[in-house]
Each structure stands twice: as structure tokens, then as C-alpha cells.
Image: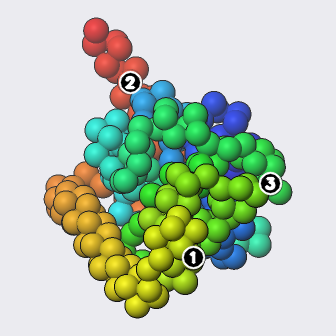
Amino acid sequence: MRNLFRSFERFGVDYLLISGQASILYGAATFSEDVDIWIRPSRANARGILAALASRRARVHKLTPPLELRFLRAGHGFHFIIPGRPLPVYLDLMGTPPRVRAFSECRRRSRLLDTDWGQIPVVAIEDLIALKKTRRFTDYEVISNLVSVRLSETDRPSRRLLRWAARNTFRAEDRATFLRRLGEPTSLARCRSEIAREVETLQARDARYWRSRIAELRQLRRAGKLWAEGTPVSDLLTGLIRKSGAIESAR
């Protein structure tokens, strides 16, 4: 892992750590199989991440479209596997994830955290919560933990922060507590009912978001335009460099 993040630094990759590993660093989760990153969606940054992955002998994993600007901006996921000891690292990256503002704005809000892998730019808790509002039920417990972590950072939370906490926690007991502190006492039964409806709505939105992208991936697969699983990233990078050189020569 340390070598992976060092390769990002070496090749000037502009990125943020998100999802499970970010939740672990904030103390809101205990386990995550994958490393998820959000990269600035630019051609130069895409070339940088490919160079970094090639240096770590990464290969394509699962359904992955070409790492091009149009697919980065369309919100697709890109999947790679990097050899490691004792286990390989599974890396998922996106250029335009759902439910958050532009990369540049979230980059400004991010935190530089000290980790076993070095200093890592990690998405802010507020943006991480937005990213975690997925179809997975387990994400809502992590979100509630993140809310608690954010509140623990201040001894006297403002009404605005308490309002944000009440809106984003998915534990009925916590929501009732926050509302009571705001002078808006609400029964546990009502909190549970509201949370159930909210989770159902959020899950449906996430399903709709991925439905169109999965449909496009299927079209790309039928057309033979997905990167083949197992392909070394170094081969892909070499091909892109040759293609770029041919274009420049034609000009």
C-alpha cells in the first residue's frame, strides 16, 4: 500500500482517498477489502494514474472502460489489481462520483492524514457521507459513525452542526437526541419511520444512477471496447503513447 501511494506522488496524481479506507482512517469502520480513490478528471491526471499503476505492475480487473476523459466525466468506475504482499490490492477509482460537488471543491475541503502509508489526502467527512449513501445497508451504519466522529471534534457543536447531524445520522436514537438538543423533541418511532423512508429513497436513487452506467458498459462490452480483464496497465500505457505519437505525426 505504501508503495502504491508513493507511486501516486511520484507521478503527480491528484487524488482523494474515499469510501471504505477513508472511513477506517476516520475511525468509523474497521474493514474494507478495496482501496477507492477519486482522481481529478483530466487527461493529464489520467495519464499520471496509468503511469503510476504501470510502475506497480497493475492489471485491469472487472468491467473497466478505457481511462478516457469522457468516461471519467460520465461517472464510470475503473478497476485494477496490484500485486502485493501478503495479498494483492484491489483499486477502484472514479473521476466523477455521485452525490458530491466538483473535485476541486472537495479537494479544498479534504484532510491530509498521517497513515501507515504516509500522508494521504482524504475526502472530508461531510463529502464522504454523501458518497456513502449507496444501496448497501451496511453503509448507513458507517455514515452514522462518521456523524458521531464529526461531532466529537468539537465540545460545543453549533445548531447548524447539530442540524446536519440530525439530518445525516441513520440511528434513530442519535437522531432523537440531536433533535431534542435543538428543541425539537421527536419520538423514536417517528425517527425510525423517517429513517426507513430516507434509506429506501437513497437506495433507489443509487440504483438509478448505476443503471444507466451499467447499460453503457454492456454496450461497450458488446462492441469490444472495454479493456480486457487481466491486461497489464503497462501495455495499455504503451499503446496510448504510440497512439498519441501517431496523432502528433499526422498533424
Say what amino acid the circle numbered 3 marks.
Thr
Residue at the far bottom: name it.
189
Say what amino acid the circle numbered 1 marks.
Thr
Q: Determine whether, in the image, residue 162 is placed left or right of residue 46.
A: right
On-image quarter of the N terminus: bottom right
Residue at the far top: name it.
251
Q: Which quarter of the figure has residue 78?
A: bottom left
Say what amino acid the circle numbered 2 marks.
Ser
On-image quarter of the C terminus: top left
Report the Cα–Cα distance between label 3 and label 2: 37 Å
Q: Which quarter of the figure has residue 187?
A: bottom left
Q: Secondary structure at mark 1?
A: helix
* Of residues 216 and 244, the one drawn nearer to the viewer in this rendering: 216
Give residue 163's mark: none
Residue in view at x 50 percent, y 58 percent: 164
Mark found first going from the N terminus, 1 or 3:
3
Give residue 115's mark: 3
Residue in view at x 51 percent, y 40 percent: 106
Mark found first going from the N terminus, 3 or 2:
3
Asked if 96 appears above or below 197 in the picture, the reply is above
* Of residues 81 and 19, the one drawn nearer to the viewer in this rendering: 19
| Disc 2 residue crowd, few under 14, some 14–19, many 20+, Cα 10 Å | few
Mark found first going from the N terminus, 1 or 2:
1
Mark 2 lies on residue: 244
Report the Cα–Cα distance between label 1 and label 3: 33 Å
Mark 1 lies on residue: 177
Q: Is residue 187 visible?
A: yes
Residue in view at x 77 percent, y 44 percent: 119
* Of residues 41 and 155, the one drawn nearer to the viewer in this rendering: 155
x, y percent for residue 137: 44, 81
| Disc 3 residue crowd, few under 14, some 14–19, many 20+, Cα 10 Å | few
